[in-house]
Amino acid sequence: MLSVRLTISNISRLCAALFFAFVLVGASAQENSPFSRYGIGEYYTNQHIISRSMGGLTAAYADGTNNNVGQSVNFSNPATYGHFYMSTFDVAVTIDSRTLYSATPTGKFGSANFYPAYLALGVPLNRVKGWGIAFGLKPISRINYSVQSLQRIAGDSLQTLYEGSGGLNQAFVGIGKRWGTFSLGINTGYNFGRKEIDTRKTFINDTVSYYSSKSSTNTNFGGVFLSGGMQYDLLLSKHTNTTAKTTESYMLRFGFTGTLQQRMKATQSIDRQTYTVSASGDLKIDSVSTQSDIAGTVQLPATYAAGVTFHKTAANSRGVFELWSVGAEYTSTQWTKYRFYDQADKLADSWQFKFGLQFAPDPLASRGYWNNVNYRAGFYMGKDYIDADGKGLKTFGVSLGAGLPIRKWSSYNDQFTVMNLALQFGKRGSAANNVTENYMQLSLGISLSDIWFVKRRYD
């Protein structure tokens, strides 16, 4: 018989509570980013905390294979699900600070944002045969801006306020299979979101009173997505140190991921009206035009990533430990194929080159906490998908991080808890752009691993 260490009902309650916390915290997040006006909005860093601290490496990264790294859910490459040896619960949050700089007119605007990064659960279906499954929820993008402009028309001052809110979220489930050194996996699920846009115009005149106008377009969209990934491990060399009684190995891991183009069904409502401002808020005067339930589609483009990592591991009587790893990755998305109700936007095909590394000082040592900490660093550079001024937006960033074991795994203990930290500094835009952005992100994640189903020795 099987005894459940964490009962299904308790897991359900935990997931439900965290889901509502996830939604509420995400709904309360505040930021004013004019870049989020374009496309599907401002894209989150849609990677695990470990990957963020290594410059964004995902395609060729996998853990759960070495004792000192622990286990996380690399939802960016479902081929890694076949490495699960324990059930893992992953949750993370991010604090985001951004500063926008405008060259003409000269100005600076800063904002801070707190939001949930992801909620994921990975379970080994069959550790011997290399089957694993994962599912979770994460935000993909956010739309949140409020931009005001002033101009003169026919001798009067016209104030225009552009506002937007919404974003895209994803609920996913995936399965992975490992055949020795080759792994394959797929993710599917549902992308869903909304885009609410308001444009308000007000004439500023001391002698004549005008009603203000408001144009609102609200769109809800959603659809099924499909992505996949693969990894292959190539052993380069292996030798045994008879004095230290260890076996050292050098290995290359190749990885590839891809997401198919997606067409989400959408429903839109449009309202044009005049209004005035009262003590209780906007007071509608007259409807100029109203339309509802307008059917359409939102088309998201295909994306792919390919990478390689180089590893050194050491094995002794206590298990296999990763000493260090270094890797590189290239990713690209065809954003020129994006369509919103058959309309293109000010977007460009994006690309990014990433480089990252990870090392532990002396994981073979039986003592010394800091010897078992995994230190990480990386950088990335590329081109953003937003092209508002037609000059492109260059991107560059560096990252630092660490994996801090809270509870280490051993042959006498089937639990492993790791707190992962990532700190990212980046810039978007260059001297060629009128508006540039500097940002800092601090992310904190917890990976809770345990054997939930244990076969009883006695009834």
Image (tube, rainbow, N blue to C red):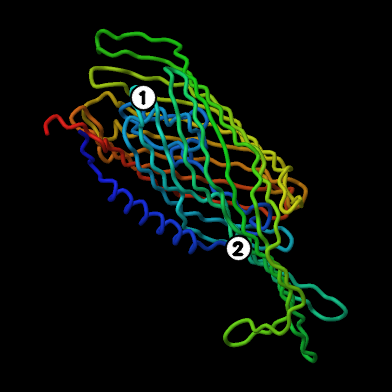
Q: Is residue 292 left or right of residue 259?
A: right
Helix, strand or loop at label 2? It is strand
Q: Residue furthest right?
A: 154
**How far apart are the alpha carbons under marks 2 and 1?**
44 Å
Q: Describe the element under mark 1 as helix, strand or loop.
A: strand
Instruction: Identify the residue position indicated by label 2 in the image.
Output: 165
Whether residue 148 is visible, yes or no, is no
Give the quarter of the figure containing the C terminus: top left
Please give the name of the residue rendered at 47% of the width and 20% of the height, measured from the top-left corner. Answer: 182
Mark 2 residue crowding within 10 angstroms, few (<14) / some (14–19) / many (20+): many
At 62% from the left edge and 87% from the top edge, which residue is drawn?
278
Query: Image check: 351 left or right of 237?
Result: right
Considering only vertical position in the picture, is 239 above or below 345?
Answer: above
Residue 133 visible in image:
yes
Return the residue nearer the eye: 52 or 119: 119
- Picture quadrant where residue 73 is located: top left
Residue 199, image x and y in percent?
Answer: 71, 70
Q: Residue furthest left?
A: 458
Crowding at dot 1, Cα within 10 Å, few <14 / some 14-19 / many 20+, comes out as many
**Where residue 88 sits: x, y (%)?**
34, 39
Task: Name the residue: 40% across, 19% down.
Answer: 312
444 or 211, nearer to the observer: 211
- Label of residue 322 in the image: 1
**Residue type marked 1:** Glu
